[in-house]
Amino acid sequence: MALMDLKFYSESLGMQTEAYVVIPQKSSSGEIGVNTKASAEKYKCLYLLHGLSDDHSIWLRRTNIERYAQEYGICVVMPCGARSFYTDLKYGEKYYTYIAKELPRIIREFLNVSEKREDNFIAGLSMGGYGALKIALGECGSYAAAAGLSSVADIEKCAERWETLFKQIWGEKIEIPPKDRLFDLAEIMNGRADKPRIYMAVGTEDSLYEDNQKLKELFEKLDYDFTYKESEGNHNWAFWDKYIQDVLKWMFDVSK
């Protein structure tokens, strides 16, 4: 695998930004302890989103995502979403537009990544889990599957906790539209034939457990290809490192 620190200009953000990218190296002859599945075809791509207190470096620092990705021969793009909840801010930058629309175009411009829906995936944890599910549902037809780990499932319940931040994102009255509410989006997109497969996982000791249960129940009532996992665990990297491996198997292991 190659690791890239990709610095580039975003028109949506109006500034330079950064993403870490791991991408297969087709030939690694002589490299000890490495087994690559890189192919001659364009690569499948996973967009991997961080949580509220982190940045684009965190998946590399807290997990072995580079090694995990190598098992499947996929490209993984880890962008910086700041504290945006992957939303076009009322008073600030357009992070939804950047992550959901502009970034995939830029990555395909720079790298040998497939543009096909069936080859594109998105996942994240906490705020990033919310962002991944929201983007995959909001951009039906763009992603084959999405995974949320310990996701912020009910965004409206968090308004009081993060009032100052949410005012910056959604305005002084914190009026969150249906396109930014996962429960509404799931119902709105239910009739789409091209809606993504959905994966959710949460720890039973996580403070977000009950909200994830409610979203799980909704997906199970609707017509989604839906997978849910839970186990003992909290809102931490021990849980996320374990379950990102399960997410990759669910997304990319055709023999599962």
Image: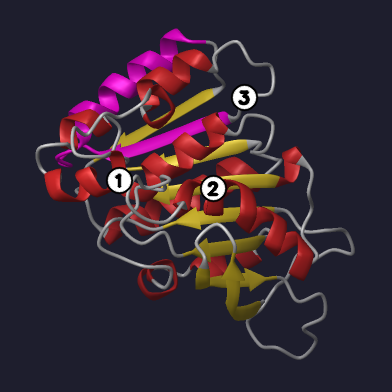
The residue that disc 1 covers is: 169
The residue that disc 3 covers is: 195
- Asked if residue 217 lies in the magenta stretch, the reply is yes
The residue that disc 2 covers is: 97
Question: Which x, y percent locates residue 39?
Answer: 84, 63
Q: Are marks 1 and 3 in contact (CB under 8 Å)?
A: no
Amino acid identity at mark 3 = Lys
Q: Label 2 to label 3, Cα distance in Å?
A: 19 Å
Specify the quadrant of the image occupied by residue 219: top left
Amino acid identity at mark 2 = Thr
Lateral position of residue 64 relative to residue 11, left or right: left
- Mark 1 lies on a secondary structure that is helix
Q: Give the range drawn in magenta.
A: 197-222
Q: Label 2 to label 1, Cα distance in Å?
A: 14 Å
- Judge whether 251 appears above or below 181 on screen: below
Specify the quadrant of the image occupied by residue 156: top left
- Asked if residue 46 lies in the magenta stretch, the reply is no
- Judge whether 48 appears above or below 174 on screen: below
